[in-house]
Amino acid sequence: MENKGRNRGEGKIDYMVLILTVTITVIGIIMVYSASYVNSGFRYENPNKIIYKEIIFAIIGMALMFLGMKIPYRIYRGTLTRLLAWITFITFLLLLTPMGLDLNGGLRWINLGFTTFMPSELAKYTCIFLMSEALTKKDIDCRRLGDAGKFWLAPGFFIAMVAMQPDLSTAFILFCITFYLYYIGGIRKTWIFFLFGIGILGIAGLIAIEPFRILRVKTLLDPFYDPQGAGYQVLQSLYAIASGGIKGVGLGASRQKLLYLPEPQNDYIFAIISEELGFIGSLSIIFLFVALISRCFMIAANAPDRYATFIVSGITIQMALQSLVNMFVAVSLLPSTGIPLPLISYGGTSLVLNLFAMGIILNISKYDRRYIQKDKDKVIKKKYHKIESRRRNI
């Protein structure tokens, strides 16, 4: 019966999600080129090097997205999820070897020679698949305290590994993903405040023990507190957004990308979008993300089973959080941190994994309960008409 249900659902992917994903990715490629060619020319003596790499990553990501559309989502349960967890664990260990790359005070990248890889990006999806599988096991009840500890064991380990890199912002996103899945999985309401309190105390403690994080919080409250130090990036981002106005200064005409704004193609690409395309352009990007995230949540709500619901919900909340954090940092509503804008910012690991994740969502959209019900209704109507025609002939 399950195979028949799959056959009826084949081909019924959510084309709106596909169109929105491809549109945002194409816009990202255009904006990465516009934001990076000056920085790329200064750093690599080749203004096109960054965009060439981004296009290659986009092609690989698109290929994996279409592959993810074809692979039934149930195949990830069990062995593949455990294999993914081990691979993620090994990549974290590789950070401690000579392959680990320390940039800007953070040991977050693995040097593969031809490119770099961020284990923390893989850890996000590892936590999603581990939690999705754990929350759908019949012999485990997340409302029991003992079982709750099992849920947080693996995610808690990865959160701690990311926090020690140090990468507090990504660790916070991992915590939020785990907490959200735990919440929709049926957590006791009395535990919500307890877990939320632990998260807040943990973040406050990690901020308090690092002077540079305290400085970033002070800069959030007053961007001019350290204009040539911790507040430099934030001020340049605000200058870019303010100079964009309503219509922007024009595509490719940004002034802040002329080596004023660090990493304009990555952490602060939303500031470049706002400067070049103005309020209208930045609002359009926000609208595209809202449409994509809303559509994905709709797929989660109509998924064929709980496992699919958890997977889609986890991927969607991850993209929503990253989008919010990146944009809020650009407008100085959050302390400066290195969170990329999904599908838009430069970054091979993030782009490839996000596109593959969208392929998984598109595969799950094939089995939307609404489509299956429509197919069942069509079959019932056909049988009814056949019976009626036979009755009339008699």
Image: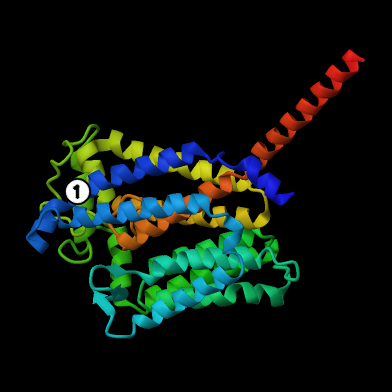
**Which residue is painted at 23% across and 73% down in the image?**
113
The part of the image, by quadrant, that contains residue 377 is top right
Q: Nearer the viewer, residue 48 or 72?
A: 72
The answer to whether 137 appears left or right of 96 in the picture is right
Q: Which residue reaches farthest right?
A: 394
Q: Residue at x 73, y 68 (%)?
A: 141
The residue sitting at 41% across, 44% down in the picture is 21
Q: Is residue 140 at all visible to an observer of this figure?
A: yes
Is 263 rendered above or below residue 362? Answer: below
Q: Position of residue 5 (x, y in %)?
A: 69, 45
Q: Position of residue 180 (x, y in %)?
A: 57, 59
Q: Quadrant of residue 106?
A: bottom left
Q: What residue would you read off at disc 1?
A: 33
Q: Is residue 377 above or below residue 334?
A: above
Camera-side residue: 201 or 162?
Answer: 162
Whole-percent x, y for residue 216 in the image: 30, 66
Judged from this view, the residue extending furthest toward the bottom is 97
SS at mark 1? helix
Where residue 301 appears, x then y in whole percent?
63, 46
Q: Residues within 10 Å of mark 1 (few under 14, many from 20)?
A: many
Q: Residue at 54%, 57% (x, y): give it.
A: 314
Identify which amino acid the numbered label 1 is placed on. Answer: Tyr
